[in-house]
Amino acid sequence: MSKPLLGIVLGAILGAIDGLTAWFTPAVRDQLGGIVVGSTIKGIIAGVAIGFFAKKFHSLPIGILFGVLVGAFLAFLVALMQGGYYLQIVLPGTVVGLIVGFATQRYGNTAAEARG
Amino acid sequence: MMWLSDDKLDHLRGIADTRYAFVKELGRGGMGTVYLAEDRELDRLIAIKVLNTPAATDDLRQRMIREAQIIARLEHPGIVPVHDTGTLPDGRIFYAMKYVRGSRLDEYAAQGASLNDRLRKFQSVCDAVAFAHAHGVIHRDLKPQNIMIGSFGEVLVLDWGVAKIKPQTNADERKSDSDLRSSAFICGNTLQGTVIGTHDYMSPEQARGEIEIDERADVYSLGVVLKSLLIGHKTSKATRAICLKAMAPEPENRYASASELSTDVGRLLDAEPVSAYRENALERTGRWVNKNRFLVLLVLAYLVMRIFLIFTSRH
């Protein structure tokens, strides 16, 4: 799987799971649908950015760092819009960025590999 | 002071008159002696193999020339290259080859190399042997003592003195069989002219003195070499299965080629499933987790963090 595609798929899956965990917070349980959709979109955006970065730069540490920064930044924007829950939103978003950053560098194929 | 025998002095005199200056003896076999020598023209050290006696039979001389020709046609980073061949003033045939600095595979293993390093070196050996097979050459005497690990980790397969060139036609086959019978390498406790190789490393069909052996005889020897590299290490079932498949008593149950064996070892090193062993679901999961330790660790960290956040948000 190419790095951008892997980034998108992983970002979407992890974003959706991240959103679903809101179910465990009773205060926001009635907004679960919106949270999951928003979190998935956030994951896809992060995945696209991290995936294309991984395509350009072949370095595991730099890829992970970029993933952390993108994940944290997007999660911070969401928390800003929510007006709270900074820890609950930014921390998981950062770790999701880290995982996507690692996975795209480690498992994603370069364009030449993808062509086979 | 060390006294040299007349025989050895003859060797030294013979070499001294050529372009090569004798430095020391590196090893002695049934057919020839290998010396470290200095190439005066190119100002470098080389290894030089000299036929033991000038009064050698035509068969022995032919075999020496054949050995040099076999090595010369196998241009591969894993096969020691031949630089020159000729006859010494006393009539003995020689050939000069690259002098490999380093240690033999058994010495390398004894130095405490990790299992993965050993397997990587072994894979390089398989690749060199597979290359020879692809060029119709069967080594027939693969053992750790015939494999050198160079100073920079390069792997070189040596001693092609008893190699067999696979005949292309039936006439070649008959000639090859006849050549083999007349120039067979003598193995300590077996009948002269029939058994070729080193007993502990040879395949059952080689030990029976069968002439019609193929690449799978080398695969067997490679299996024994692999087994020797695993001694003292805790190995997985997959590793042992590779070893057992390579050393299967019947050739048809072995890997069909050295490259197949190399592929399986490569898969083992990459923590992928190997053809020699069918793993169950638990083993498959364990292998995947082991291969993707960092990712598993990240996901676990994520889950722990999530549980922590859920717990703190409720209190």
Image (cartoon, coloured by chain):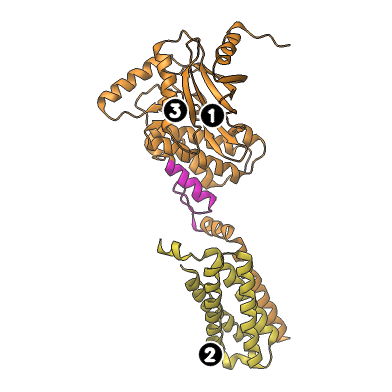
Chain colours: A yellow, B orange
Kind of residue at disc 1: Asn
Q: State how far apart marks 2 and 3 are (Cα).
A: 70 Å
Residue sticking out furthest to the left: B170
Q: Residue at x 63, y 32 (%)?
A: B107
**Image: A58 above or below A91:** above
Residue B233 percent coordinates (x, y): 62, 41
Residue A82 position within the rendered picture, expressed as x and y whole percent measured from the top left: 64, 92
Q: Which mark is residue A33?
A: 2
The nearer-to-camera label among 1 and 2 is 1
* Residue of label 1: B146
* Label 1 – label 2 distance at C-alpha: 69 Å
- Mark 2 neighbour density, 10 Å: few (under 14) some (14–19) many (20 or more): some
Instruction: Kindly identify the amino acid type of the residue bearing the numbered disc 3.
Output: Arg
Q: Which range of residues does the magenta coloring cover?
A: B259-281
> Residue placed farthest to the front in the image?
B41
Do the numbered discs 2 and 3 sit on residues whose CB atoms are within 8 Å? no
Judged from the image, the secondary structure of the residue bearing numbered disc 3 is loop
* Res. B140 mark: 3
Estimate the x, y position of residue A10 in percent, counting from the top left.
52, 74
